[in-house]
Amino acid sequence: MEAFPGLIDCHVHFREPGLEHKATIASEASAARSGGVFVCCEMPNTTPPTNSIERLKDKVERADHARDVCDVRFFFGATVHEHLAELEQLLSDPSLASLRRHCCGLKLYLDNSTGDMKSEDDVTEAAFALCGKYSFPLVAHCEHAGTNDRCSCIPYTNAASHSERRPAISEVTSIREAISRAEKHNTPLHIAHLSTAEGMRCVKDARERGVKVTCEVTPHHLLLTVADYDTLGGRGKVNPPIRYSDDQELLWDGVIDGTIDCIATDHAPHLLSEKDTTDGMPPSGLPGVEVSLRLLLSIALGHWPHPTTKPPASALKLTTEMIRRLMFTRPNEIFDLHASDAPAIRIDKQGSYTITNENQKTKCGWTPYNGWEVKGDFSLI
Ligand code: DOR
Ligand code: ZN
Ligand code: ZN
């Protein structure tokens, strides 16, 4: 009987404090666990953002009661130099060592997304230098303001037009800039939610030159394409956007050949009342923490779960060993999480399961994979 350790999702948004109408640490910790995810790395774009020692402490205390359900670690955020000064204190003051263990890295937004946490050039440069100095993971949300068309007078009339306004070149330009800063400062750089084949090539080339760069891809960029906007509408709006099938196919090649280090969901709960708004401006983001293992397990067992598309050539080469590397071994190494590798999830290869909005535990109560039938099932040991 095959078993996995409790898995790691190194990119989630749990919304607490400040956005508890969408989700809470407790609600999303139980969603994660039901999906076989025992450790999550949570992003700083809450209200207020996690950009000081005090605010980090507050989140760690909030997560205390949920730790047996899911061990939530937190990314620090920075938009101005004062935030970096706080981070340097966290990294250097021995009396903060126990708090430091709950902080998995620094997250920088190189363009605005949910939370408007874009860091300006001089702060970005200083952040790469600081993380290089302490060999501390720096996760970059790579979109480039100069190549995004964000004219605020034109609403995003639908999710498809959102894809056109945040084109592939936006991600690629931003990844190139981030890599050159990492190279200069010897920063351990991790590219969040890689969505383009060209961006992946940049990562691969840089790594071959000896740059310390790793990357993750989301289940939605592996499973969905722009064709899904027809059914998802505003629910499919996400940053970076769902892409065309040529990017999707090449990302799968990267999953199979090991260029992609991690699969992380970018679990970003928003209420359906917000996503289905008729004002043309739904918020960006999709939930995913509790379904990623189900989706990947199905593919590893030979069943592509998308109801209307064919699998990219590489996808069906996925194995359960690869899932273990992508959702446990690599995130555990990259973010130095010291997660337990004891068997925790018993895989049932003969089982099956239907993903529905109704069986989601996330507080937002929906999934972009509503109605999808997956092969395989699992239970917690
Ligand atoms: O689509 C997104 N949603 N992308 C992000 O970078 C943030 C996330 C969120 O927090 O909703
Ligand atoms: Zn992001
Ligand atoms: Zn995110």
Image (cartoon, rainbow, N blue to C red):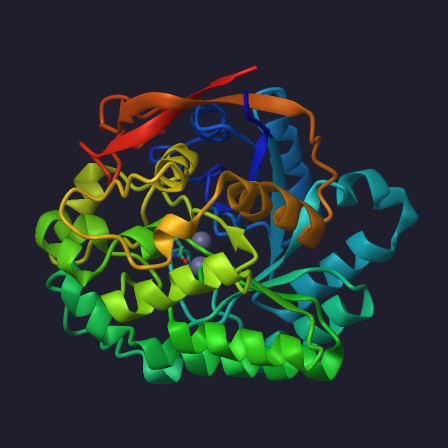
Check the image and report above or below for 201 versus 222.
below
Residue 187 position in % (x across, y down): 71, 71
Q: Please state if 31 lies on the left or on the right of 154 as rendered.
A: right
Residue 322 position in % (x across, y down): 53, 46
Residue 113 position in % (x across, y down): 38, 62
**Whether residue 200 can be seen here:** yes
Q: Residue at x 30, y 23 (%)?
A: 352
Quarter residue 373 falls in:
top left
Residue that protrudes farthest toward the right in the picture: 94
Q: Please state if 169 lies on the left or on the right of 354 as rendered.
A: right
In-front residue for pair 233/116:
233
Check the image and report above or below for 290 versus 219.
above
Quarter residue 321 falls in:
top right
Q: From the image, which quarter does the N terminus lie in?
A: top right
Q: Residue at x 74, y 79 (%)?
A: 185
Q: Residue at x 41, y 44 (%)?
A: 267
Q: Residue at x 44, y 83 (%)?
A: 173
In-front residue for pair 35/149:
35
Q: Please state if 261 lies on the left or on the right of 360 as rendered.
A: right
In-front residue for pair 171/223:
223
Number of callouts in the render? 0
**Whether residue 120 can be seen here:** no
Residue 9 position in % (x across, y down): 53, 42
Q: From the image, which quarter does the C terminus lie in?
A: top right
